[in-house]
Image (cartoon, rainbow, N blue to C red):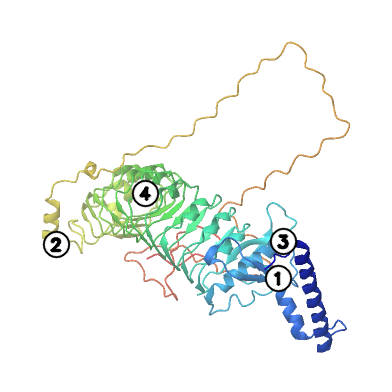
Amino acid sequence: MKKKTHFELRFLHISLLIAFLFGASVSVSASGIGHGRLTEAETLYIKQRQLLYYRDEFGDRGENVTVDPSLVFENGRLKIAYIALQAWKQAILSDPRNLTRNWVGSNVCKYKGVFCAPALDNPKIRTVAGIDLNHGDIAGYLPEELGLLVDLALFHINSNRFCGTVPHKFKHLKLLFELDLSNNRFAGKFPAVVLKLPSLKFLDLRFNEFEGTVPRELFDKPLDAIFINHNRFVFDLPDNFGNSPVSVIVLANNKFHGCVPSSLGNMSNLNEIILMNNGFRSCLPPEIGSLKNLTVFDVSFNQLLGPIPDSFGGLVSLEQLNVAHNLLSGKIPASICSLPSLQNFTYSYNFFTGEPPACLALRSFDDRRNCIPARPLQRSAGQCKSFLSRRPVDCSSFRCKPFVPSLPAPPPPSPPIVPVPSSPPPPVVRPLTPPPPPPPSPSPPPPPVYSPPPPPPPNPPPSPSPPPPIVYESPPPPTPVYEGPLPPIYGVSYASPPPPPFY
């Protein structure tokens, strides 16, 4: 066959186009809409064809989100927030309380559980600053599109049935300072994406199915609260554990082992630490006695040996001390029971051989199942003899890392001295027009973790009032009945509603 020339191909293309347009006009005339009127079906078809389609580089986890062009958004950021929230709504499999029922339309600031506030870098516009779907019993997963909510400061979804993993695109949430994923069904390795959140202060991963090791980098982050209890983490606490500036840290009910680190003595901000029910096997490091702000210390249900260090008498703020269910021995130091703020001292199920009278005068104490003479409910003589006849505990044999006190950062070097020139400087030529104003300074960082959440829209859903702090009795009071297992209260005031008692 003879090859067609370029001119012949172009003529053929134009001919086909004319034939198509002519056929289309005939079709329109035949259907009775040749005067510009469209049927409802045709109008709907065109509208659907004009729907905007969004799909980022999110791979298989991206949702097919469309944005109706007839929707009017207050600003571009709220339009992006609409995409993120609609993707999340598609990823929700069950919402028995209909919390997301009104997630319809362009006014995302009216969505239940979504809170807007002026943008930090442009206070003239509103943006999504907080999400609170706590206690919603919602089942589903977190889509990658949630990483589009770059102005988000608070993300609270505790006490739901979310599963899967934490999206990698959370790394874009540079303003996020409270992340509460507790009491859900998340699984897999520790969500390393939280290490990429520069503003994060409050991290709560309690009551999930995370497993494996915890990255040592977590304890170098400037966090104020870490809750990772009731998971399946297995590892030794690293030697940089004491670098953490937290005021509250709860690691209970995992499978940690090894030593209680002596670097605890560096944690001068620490108020509460809960290490119960892991697998720690070492002595109690005396450096803990330097923590003047410590109010709660719980290392119960481990395998700790040796005596309680006399230095614990320096814990002048201590209110709750629990060392029960270990292998501790020796006599209780009198200085501990004389601490001015101590309310509850639980040292049952050990092998202590003596307690000062001051311990018996405490508001609440528990000395059962020890080897203390003349006290009721102690261990049998055979049990005490068998344990106490062993070789004395050598705390150095546990090969724990030595204590290295933290040192203040060295001052910056002084700037070099520039000699003053002997000759006068050249004259300054001033411009005829004033110079342009300097560029705006970057927005300040998000408020500190103890600040209230961003202002909610009018008539926000009421948040439950935090319950009063818990006083541990001996034996502890029965846990109240809740609809599901919820994380504990430790007296820290955050925007996320506090979970129920730990015990």
First in residue order: circle 4 vs circle 2: 4
- Residue plotted at (32% across, 64% down): 474
Of tags 4 and 3, which is closer to the observer? 3
Query: In the image as oriented, which residue stretches furthest toward the front?
Result: 1
Decide which of 171, 411 is in the foreground and name it.
171
- Residue plotted at (55% across, 49% down): 198
Above or below for 433 versus 324? above
The answer to whether residue 147 shows anywhere in this view is yes
Above or below for 246 versus 164? above
Mark 4 secondary-structure assignment: loop
The amino acid pointed to by label 3 is Gly
Query: Percent x, y for residue 4?
Result: 72, 65
Q: Which mark is residue 76?
A: 3
The amino acid pointed to by label 4 is Leu
The amino acid pointed to by label 2 is Ser
Quadrant housing the N terminus: bottom right
First in residue order: circle 4 vs circle 1: 1
